[in-house]
Amino acid sequence: METIVHSQRSSEPLLLDGVREISSLEDILSAIPPRDFVNRLISRYFNSKDPSVAAFHAPAFQLEYKRFWDNPRAASLPWISLLFGVMALSVFLHMRSGDKLPEAFGNPGDMRDDFHRRATECLLLSKYSTEPGAYTIEALLFNIHNEFVRSKDAHLGVWILAGIATRLAMRMGYHRDPSHYSQLSVFQGEMRRRCWASILQMDALFSCQLGLPAMIQESQYDTQLPSNLLDEDFGPNSVKLPKSRPETDLTPVLYTITKTRFLLLFRVIFNQVALQCVAEYDEIIALSQRLENAYALISPHFRMASLEDYITVPPYSLIQRYNLELLFQKTRCILHRHHMAKSYQEPKYNFSRYSCVEAAMAILTHHANIHKEVQVGGLLHREKWFISSLEQHDFLLASMIVCLELTSQTQSSPERDDQMTGLVKFGRQELIKALETSKLSWHRLKSDSFEAQKAFDMLSVMLDKVSMSTQDNGNHTASRHIDDDSMLEPSTLEGVERQLGTVKTSQTTDTPFLNEMDSFLNGQDMIDWNAWELFMKNSRGESRGA
């Protein structure tokens, strides 16, 4: 077998940037490591509990895998691409947890990049875009997944790749429920449902990350969610799909089902924001209630509570809980952030202010806990790379919202702050402490991430401004202790509405700085970095002139 060599890392996804010299099939096959080593990589992946495992039927894959070793040249190019994709992700999982790989195969990062390059070459050789076939979509999804985990920041190229996968899947009929196609076996149909669920997630989350409209609309598909089944419940020879297990049964696909179902509502909310279609406030309130109801229906297997309750929970389960909790709180922020800004002038929108600040503080509380647990000896130390650019985006959005709230408090009168104490349940010092803790986390990431550097700079400027304001005006807001559990407990509409009628918001506050904050938080993009750069320049100018 050929020794694995380093492949030059491109700043763009390989499938878009192009592979300058595509290897022959013989060269690609010769780049596969010895079978014992590949067995180890495949086993690690399928036992990793990574959510992408749900896209596979493990027994069926194992049969294909045995056939491949019996006759490698008989395997299709998309399947070989998928094999390389799994190996690349498995190496990433080793790197994430700090586990060693045999030194004879060289640097793990180079190995992962080479596997990814081979997977890309197979897709290109297969003419995936014009002659798609079996395993094309699965191989393409893995290619995108590997591109995604290689970057610590949001990447437009990954979103473009996701768009290609979405359109290609539609061309192949994945957007129609398999029950419409008599030529598909029940096994093929169920696996297509699993793939489509992955595509729905990818489209919604990558689009939100870049502040761009999702490509898939509800009216464009009727594919049902996959059934909650174990792989042992059905297979390639099944003539009838078994009844879906109750969601009290934890299967490898239940997390995918739960997250995709929740994302259906997330998509509705995000599309309104991305398309600048800000709904009437009655509709915002109705969506808020739907969101809380959807969260209440999440299986207990994935509900988040106090971190102390999870010291015996496997890390992968804790990560799943965090991911769904962050998705819920982020959705609350997206739903309410426009009306939060309006609430500083119009008190009828105070529920959005309350909800947005509460959700943002919950996210920052999770940020602090995660940062602590990924340190040496923490519950998530071996899984510290699970924080992707998606989670970083959530933490940044939450920081911006808390900054906006602090800015409002900085420019308000003591009487107004006293009025708002019963509404926004976090005192000024709690908001500042959350940002200071978040800033510390960003400081440790900024050397490897452009977005982390941006977040660190933003919080540095904001905290400096808040500090100067506190020195000038005195800190007139009492800080009320909130324990971790109450910080994470979602508010109910009825509970807050009782407090809203008595709170009046000053309409005479001078708010140039508040408007600056609002401009780069509530633009068409989730965060307007052009406005932020202008804000930073102005802030530096003020500092020099002081």
Image (tube, rainbow, N blue to C red):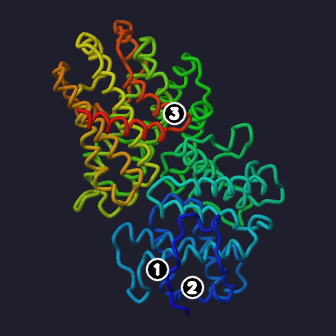
**Is 318 on the left-hand or right-hand side of 129?**
left
| In the image, farthest residue toward the right | 182
For the point 68% across and 57% down, which residue is it?
165
Q: CA distance from mark 3 to mark 2?
A: 45 Å
Give the mark nearer the N terminus: 3 vs 2: 2
Q: CA distance from mark 1 to mark 2?
A: 13 Å
Q: Please state the horizontal and vertical placement of residue 513, each as a whole percent of the image.
A: 37, 26
Give the mark nearer the N terminus: 1 vs 2: 2
Query: CB atoms at circles 1 and 2 under 8 Å apart?
Result: no
Specify the amino acid type for callout 2: Ile
Dot 3 lies on which element? helix
Location of the C terminus (image quadrant): top left
| In the image, farthest residue toward the bottom | 1
Q: CA distance from mark 3 to mark 1?
A: 40 Å
Which residue position holds label 2? Answer: 32
**Is 181 on the left-hand or right-hand side of 381?**
right
Location of the N terminus (image quadrant): bottom right
Dot 1 lies on which element? helix
- Between 203 and 43, the residue placed more toward the observer is 203
For the point 62% across and 48% down, which residue is it?
200
Specify the amino acid type for callout 1: Arg
* Marking on residue 294: 3
On screen, residue 11 above or below 433: below
Give the mark nearer the N terminus: 3 vs 1: 1
Which residue position holds label 1? Answer: 40
Q: Please state the horizontal and vertical placement of residue 516, each as a whole percent of the image.
A: 42, 28
**Foreground disc of the pair 1, 2:** 2
Query: CB atoms at circles 3 and 2 under 8 Å apart?
Result: no
Specify the amino acid type for callout 3: Ala
On screen, residue 253 above or below 37: above
Q: Please state the horizontal and vertical placement of residue 44, each as a whole percent of the image.
A: 45, 72
